[in-house]
Amino acid sequence: MKVSVSIFKFMTLAISLAMLTSCVSKKKYTEALTRAAAEKSALESQLAEVQDEKTNLEGQITDLESNLNMKSEEIVSLSEEIKDGNNKIGQLKNAISDVFTDYDNDEVNVELREGKLYVTMANSILFDAGRAKITEGSEEVIAKLAGVIKDNPGLKILVEGHTDNDPVKVHKAKYGDNWGLSVARATSVVRSLADLGVDVSRLTASGKGDTQPVAGNDTDEGKEANRRTEFVIIPKVDGLWKMYKEDFAGMGEGSN
């Protein structure tokens, strides 16, 4: 009888342990299944994001390829425009040199520098000392230059006034200093060119005072060289400005 009770107790304990073990295993299985489902969902979400990014990158690549093709065409067009501008500058150099053959290089000098044409005139043939009004004798000089410029449209002209470092003595109250005098002289020349029929949209006046000497101011010869008016003639390259504006606009769109 005791043996039967013991067997019964043992069987009951065994059954209880089996049921407990079964419950624990099922709970762990359910938890593992839940975790797996969550990980699967997260991976699917990441995969969707990667696919969206891939599609976006493919679109950007297509846009870049299209832009590169357009840039190549623009560069070819720009090269032709620059070549045409250089040809005009070269022709203008010869034309200006021809009309000023009667002047020494110290009076009128024509040279090409960095793709621009520089026509340098000594202030002694344009102005009286310390004054900004063009002398009557120099009107013919300006007229010669204006005639050539008008025959060559599409070129910008920057008129720069330069002085030596001697302080302004004549009309000091009017001009103040060399900077003011140089601005007034450049403006006088621009007005004269405009009066002679040069399109004012092509002209810009600028005064440099004594800030850009070409020789030492410690000698009379050096000061004479520094007292000058320079006509900087620049080819008009619209394509370059167009590309610059497009690139600048693109940078602005990408910034915060």
Image (cartoon, grey):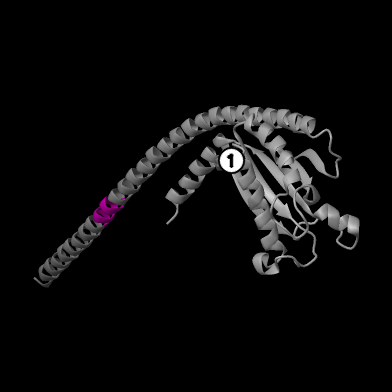
Question: In this image, 141 relative to 201: left or right?
Answer: right
Q: Residue 59 sits in which quadrant?
A: top left
Give the magenta-colored segment's residue range: 32-39
At a point 46% along the width and 46% down the height, the residue shown is 249
Q: Return the x and y of residue 118 as percentages of the image width and height.
A: 74, 41
Image quadrant where one finds the N terminus = bottom left
Image quadrant where one finds the C terminus = bottom left
Q: Is residue 74 above or below residue 125?
A: above
Q: Return the x and y of residue 141 as percentages of the image width and height.
A: 74, 40
Dot 1 amino acid type: Arg
Q: Is residue 8 above or below residue 208?
A: below
Front-most of residues 128 and 210 = 128
Classify mark 1: residues with Cα within 10 Å, few (<14), some (14-19) or many (20+).
Answer: some
At a point 14% along the width and 70% down the height, the residue shown is 6
Q: Return the x and y of residue 55 as percentages of the image width and height.
A: 38, 38
Determine the residue located farthest toward the left in the rendered image.
Answer: 1
Determine the residue located farthest toward the bottom in the rendered image.
Answer: 2
> Considering the numbered disc 1 on the image, is that residue within a helix, a strand or a loop?
helix
Residue corresponding to mark 1 = 202
Residue 36 on the magenta segment: yes
Front-most of residues 59 and 45 = 59
At a point 67% along the width and 32% down the height, the residue shown is 147
Q: Residue 240 sits in which quadrant?
A: top right
Q: Is residue 208 above or below residue 119?
A: below
Is residue 62 in sight in this rendering? yes
Question: In this image, 199 relative to 14: left or right?
Answer: right
Q: Return the x and y of residue 233 as percentages of the image width and height.
A: 68, 40
